[in-house]
Image (spheres, rainbow, N blue to C red):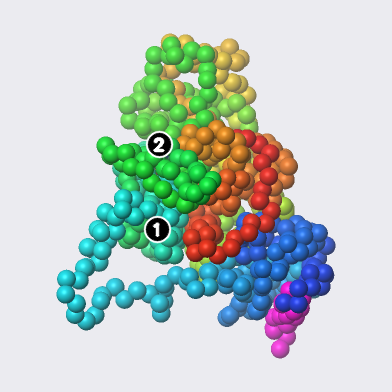
Amino acid sequence: MLEKAPNGKVSSVLNSLDEALCAGEVERAVHLFQEDCYWRDLVTFTWNIKTMEGKKQVRDMLNARLADTKPSDWKIAAGEDATEADGITESWIQFETEVARGFGHMRLKDGRIWTLLTTMSELKGHEEAVGFDRPMGAKHGAERNRKTWKEDREAEAAELGYSRQPYCVVVGGGQGGIALGARLRQLNVPTIIIEKNERPGDSWRKRYKSLCLHDPVWYDHLPYLPFPRNWPVFSPKDKIGDWLEMYTKVMELNYWGSSECKKASYDEKSREWTVVVQRGDKEIVLKPKQLVLATGMSAKPNLPKIEGMDVFKGDQHHSSLHPGPDKYKDKKAVVIGSNNSAHDICAALWEAGADVTMVQRSTTHIVKSDSLMELGLASLYSEQAVQSGMTTAKADLIFASLPYKILHEFQIPVYNAIRERDAEFYRRLEKVGFLLDYGDDDSGLFMKYLRRGSGYYIDVGASELVANGSIKLKSGVDVKKLTEHSVILSDGTELPADLVVYATGYGSMNGWAADLISREVADKVGKAWGLGSNTTKDPGPWEGEQRNMWKPTQQEALWFHGGNLHQSRHYSQFLSLQLKARMEGIPTPVYGLQQVHHLG
Ligand SMILES: Cc1cc2nc3c(=O)[nH]c(=O)nc-3n(C[C@H](O)[C@H](O)[C@H](O)COP(=O)(O)OP(=O)(O)OC[C@H]3O[C@@H](n4cnc5c(N)ncnc54)[C@H](O)[C@@H]3O)c2cc1C
């Protein structure tokens, strides 16, 4: 009986919650929460991605949303048992609302709810056709002139966007657009993905030659179709490109390659977008109800304006356009920047026999890939995790269950341990003048990613080249100007150069809205990404969730989707359900629509 004690505790809280919520007694429900509680809701109560922090915010949300959410049937998830460690009882939970089935996670402290995650699994009556409900494929029986699967697919491709309008247009067919497209396909939401490159996967193929994913395979699965067990830990970029191309085909996506979205505008009266697409040599006008920009958060290059760029006689380009090192053997290369792309490009140039200098203006967080894998990711995303029964879905939900407000507190000890373990490595880098940081509050790589999406390098070898002087380093300096054949730094140093690479990062995704829709709409929705943590490049006020990503924006029917493979996989579920609900006419009153504090 003893081992069932945690189940008893969780069931008792869930029963009380169920009773209070069914009776509409908000105060009774709020009483079940800790003072410093967090309730993160992915679409079930709020039709938003929102974290309620503290009892007051929980109370306000319930007062606004309880009556028509009509939650019920809260219980420990089928087949799961609650667990207990270090004074925290945790459990997978399930529940229903009037229109959806939900799954979640709960942590109890001193018998009250400390963290609660509620996520929408499916809309009632609009479930995905899986398992017992999977399609037959074959049409048994006999019928004159019936069409094959191939003929049906061809007819759909000929019709959608021409004689029949898609409900949704996704601009950008990288991994983000593809993952979202796959979810929408399963939910029967007619969708076209518009991609200016020729083939799915090209956004990876076109990146610099040496690129391999920095995240390991366990973190990178796409929805529905995990990588096979022999897939390499770190996918080479062309291999991931091929996987995306295969995936697009087998998931039966309506993917328009060689098609560029030229502009889009929204008619508030007809509540419809007009999207102008250049498809090959034809201009096509689409009229979807929903528009998703999946144009990439690492895709809008930040190119600095530096005096003399117009007179420089060598090659110069942003890192996103760097072709690879082959033609730079014995040439002098200057790489401006010191984050991931800069390191990867410097290492590849050095391998090809170029003379390379990295210019570092400000501090960079470096973490060795091995250490990140072992100390940062292993418990959720690793072969050991898989062997001990951790699924990708559960790992994603555990990660989602840690509120952003306190996530750094969980991260700081991890990076402290990494600093200790790799102390000699960091000492050697500092010795050659490399400027290190570990995040403003020492919370390391993942917080930097969530807050600003930049400022780090996952070391897969380039740091050794910096430490031993193979890659030359100029740190604490800026670029003053370029001459015909050199780069002049702010300390007066002149670096002769045949090649200058600007590894200077990327701009906010709402820049895409400015390009494709209007400056007015870009300003109306404001900056995308970041938490408002008031740390470098993530100005406050505190938002509690990533700005504008995967959730309603200030522009009706305009959505942003993207991020790394983990985020594309996980959040495409909630974005696709929001879109499906709108298509089906299910009321989706948004609670706590974010305010705009920064334009871009
Ligand atoms: C060097 C580098 C390394 C990275 N390493 C990793 C990693 O290891 N793991 C990881 O998970 N993430 C990584 N990322 C981050 C991120 O996952 C990738 O940037 C990823 O490609 C993002 O996918 P996406 O679909 O959101 O955007 P993208 O892949 O950038 O796709 C956006 C697409 O939109 C298209 N597009 C843009 N405008 C238009 C238009 N007007 N009309 C039609 N099409 C348009 C583009 O052609 C592009 O194909 C890395 C990023 C970079 C730059």
Q: Does the stretch in magenta take in 274? A: no
Residue 111 screen position, x and y as percent: 79, 73
Q: Among all residues in the image, which is located at the extreme left?
A: 144
Location of residue 536 (image quadrant): top right
Q: Is residue 178 above or below residue 143?
A: above
Q: Looking at the image, which is closer to me, 587 or 207?
A: 587
From the viewer's perspective, is 589 left or right of 316?
Answer: right
Magenta-tinted stretch: 1-21
Q: What type is the residue that disc 1 sits on?
A: Pro
Q: What type is the residue that disc 2 sits on?
A: Lys
Q: Is residue 545 above or below residue 323?
A: below
Which residue does the image show at 53% across and 65% down from the upper left? Answer: 393
- Marking on residue 190: 1
Residue on which disc 2 sits: 262
Q: Does label 2 point to a residue whose CB lies under 8 Å from ligand 1?
A: yes
Q: Looking at the image, which is closer to me, 40 or 125?
A: 125
- Marking on residue 467: none
Q: Residues within 10 Å of mark 2 (few under 14, many from 20)?
A: few
Q: Looking at the image, which is closer to me, 440 or 223?
A: 223
Which residue does the image show at 76% across and 64% down from the upper left? Answer: 63
